[in-house]
Image (tube, rainbow, N blue to C red):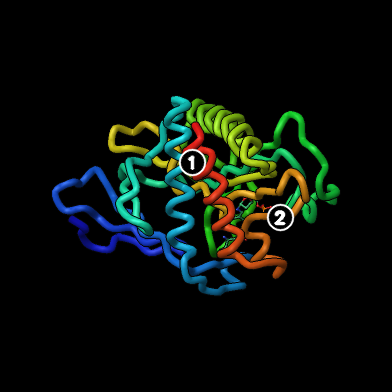
Amino acid sequence: MKGSLLYEGKAKKVYAITDQPERLILSYKNDATAFNGKKKDQFEGKGRLNNLITSKLFDYLHQQQLPSHFIEALNDTEQVVQKTTIIPLEVVVRNVAAGSITRRLGIEEKTRFTPPIIELFYKEDELDDPLINDVHAYHLTDISEKELSFIKEQALLVNEHLIQLFKDVGLELVDFKLEFGRLKDGSIVLADEISPDTCRLWDLETGKKMDKDVFRENIGDLVETYEAILQRLEEYTCAK
Ligand code: TMP
Ligand code: ASP
């Protein structure tokens, strides 16, 4: 049974589960924020779309023997996950230049990165989530060098699997952000969400942006766009 509200973030609420102290319920909200909360709006149906898309992607990763905190979708807007303590790092993987790297380093949008670039950001709203290096991460979080290597390996594996999955549904995986958490036994596991809020996806045929950039840049309808992503993933998983 759903227990008390433990935490509310920008996109999700986290609830305890009575009698299951090692599990949590993540409840996806309809809020959209960008630029560290400076741009805000609400979209009816967004919570459902991100919950269902994240559930499909974590299910797919499990099928590829890639573990995460995800257990199952509970209903349209909620999912059950293993309880973790989130490590305050945003692990960004980039296959193609877009977003902050174009502004920060003057790299032209669409430039390809082979091998992919991994960037670490320190998850701290008050500091605007600054870009940090590995040694900063050892100081700012409790992870060891070995654990950071593991996190990077996992992030690159997620990248390989998701590049293929999205390619199969006509999308290019440009970049994405992952978060990792620590289970009760201290081990580190992929956590949080993977959705069009946290990935950049470009239509392979038209190049059209099909992710949160439609909201960030006011260039399209967020709900229609996320609905199209869910539909493509559903058709793909039905066909398999
Ligand atoms: P960026 O280009 O703004 O650094 O974003 C890189 C990727 O990470 C992009 O797919 C969006 C995602 N992301 C988040 O999920 N949360 C964030 O807070 C930020 C800044 C980026
Ligand atoms: N999600 C972040 C925020 O709420 C940043 C972004 O994705 O642009 O500000």
- Image height check: is 179 above or below 124? above
* Amino acid type, callout 1: Leu
Give the labeled residue for mark 2.
Answer: 209
Mark 2 and mark 1: Cα distance apart in space: 19 Å
Q: Is residue 152 visible?
A: no
- Image height check: is 61 above or below 226? above
Where residue 60 appears, as percent x and y from the top left, is 47, 35
- Image height check: is 25 above or below 94? below
Taking the spot 79% from the left edge, 52% from the top edge, the residue there is 102
Q: Quadrant of the N terminus?
A: bottom left
Q: Is residue 55 visible?
A: yes
Q: Secondary structure at mark 1?
A: helix
Q: Secondary structure at mark 2?
A: loop
Where residue 228 appears, as percent x and y from the top left, is 58, 55
* Amino acid type, callout 2: Lys
Where residue 113 appears, as percent x and y from the top left, is 77, 35
Give the labeled residue for mark 1.
Answer: 57
Taking the spot 33% from the left edge, 43% from the top edge, the residue there is 72
Taking the spot 67% from the left edge, 43% from the top edge, the residue there is 171
In the depicted view, which residue is nearer to us: 205 or 69?
205
In the depicted view, which residue is nearer to us: 55 or 230?
230
Taking the spot 28% from the left edge, 37% from the top edge, the residue there is 184
